[in-house]
Image (spheres, grey):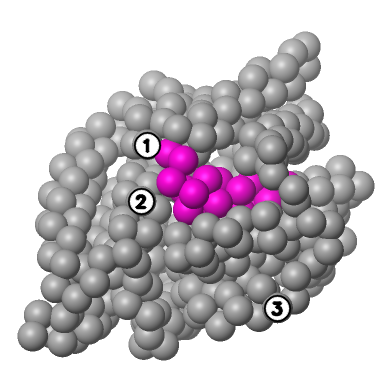
Amino acid sequence: MLLARGLAILGQLGVAILTARMLGPAERGRYYYTVTLAAIAVQIASLGIQSSNTYLIARTPALFTRIMANSLWLAGLAGLAAATGVLVFDLAIGGPEQNFVFVAIVLTLTPSLLLFLYLSNIAVALNRPRTFNALIILNGVAAIGAALLASYPTPQLGGFLVAALIASLVTCVVAWVVLAKGADIPRRFDFALFRDGIAFALRAHVATLLGFLMGRMSVMVLRQFGEFVDIGYWSIAAQISDALLILPATIGLVLFPALVRAKGAARMQQYKVALLQMTLLMAVVCAACAALAKPIVTVVFGVAYEPAVVIILALLPGVFFIGIASAASQFLSASGFPWSQVLAWLCAAALQAVLSVALFGQLGAVGLAWIQSACAGFVCAWLLLDSLRFGVPAER
């Protein structure tokens, strides 16, 4: 699974390299901002259903077909509603700069990304790692393939955005066909099933949403107070940090169902082993990235993006902390998802928002990165202490 994620990362980085070199910092900033809006809408609209789907299917596999039907309905309706909401937000902070392509991309890309999120998590819940790996690799291959086509003969912002949408739609269709093959998927939305999962899902949703917003908050601050060229530099740093975070995200995706199935002391033991491994892995990865940041940026993306190097260095401590926090988060989620876990992300997000807005004028984009890392450390410490508190009864 890690290998598949690695191949998917190459596809995403390939798109980043193409758009960075062919569009320049300012237009690359516009591209990244558009995709970020769609990604924020996905996190808002998901309602944490991907987590409850994994939990419910791991516990009761017979719910698969009903969960598939609900996922399709939610991706369409909730995705469209959330996309409309973020467009209204953009209009409020950015002024009347929206055009038809921008609006259409956000409105259609959001449901597509949301459906793929649901389907890929369902593949994991069904204990079909090969299917998950294939879909993740296909997602990366489709993205880079569509971007290459968009770069010929004349690379333009609109072409790359349409390419991103087409790649997402292709992977969604393939994922649905593969998972639904031979299954009788009902057409109606199952409200009873939705209610069963929403109590668990909402807590997971709020925590995941707040964590995602912490990672994207600086883009909104830059949109309000900075320039698109600043977002262009930030996008390269964020792309690299996101690539690094795929490692703990993938491990957590596999770890969560295993922790759900484990009981008592066995769950705590699995968690301790995973936490140690995650800490060592993230330390090595972040140290290597710090040493190679400048040559990677200047050689791969171009000298024009050298200002992104200091942003990367400032984001790396946060990457390390989030990697460790992901293991603690999976343990707490498997233990019933306490509200204190949600409170940790809420406090950190509020702190980051206040500091980012108040200090941007003095610290700039690099300061935003350091603030983000500090708040990630705050979350990490909170969740580690929380996991120890929940682990004490398990050891008795």
Whole-percent x, y for residue 270 in the image: 18, 61
Query: Circle 3 sits on which residue?
Result: 192
Q: Which residue lies furthest to the right in this view?
A: 100
> Magenta region: which residues?
112-129
Whether residue 255 is in magenta: the answer is: no
Q: Check disc 2 and give the amino acid type.
A: Val
- Marks 3 and 1, how far apart in space? 33 Å
Residue ID at (91%, 47%): 100
Direction from residue 73 to residue 195 in the image, left or right: left
Amino acid identity at mark 3: Ala
Mark 1 crowd level (few <14, some 14–19, many ≥20, 10 Å Cα): some
Q: How far apart are marks 3 and 2 (CA)?
A: 27 Å
**Image point (26%, 38%), residue name:** 289
Label 1 to label 2, Cα distance in Å?
Answer: 9 Å
Pointer 3 with pointer 2, Cβ within 8 A: no
Q: Where is residue 314 in the image (x, y as percent from the top left)?
A: 31, 55
Quarter location, residue 320: bottom left
Q: Identify which amino acid the numbered label 1 is placed on.
A: Met
Front tag of 3 and 2: 3
Marks 1 & 2, CB-CB < 8 Å contact: yes
Residue 390 lies, with reference to residue 375, above or below; the image says below
Looking at this rendering, what residue extends furthest in the top direction?
153
Q: Where is residue 29 in the image (x, y as percent from the top left)?
A: 62, 44
Reading the image, the residue beneath label 2 is 254
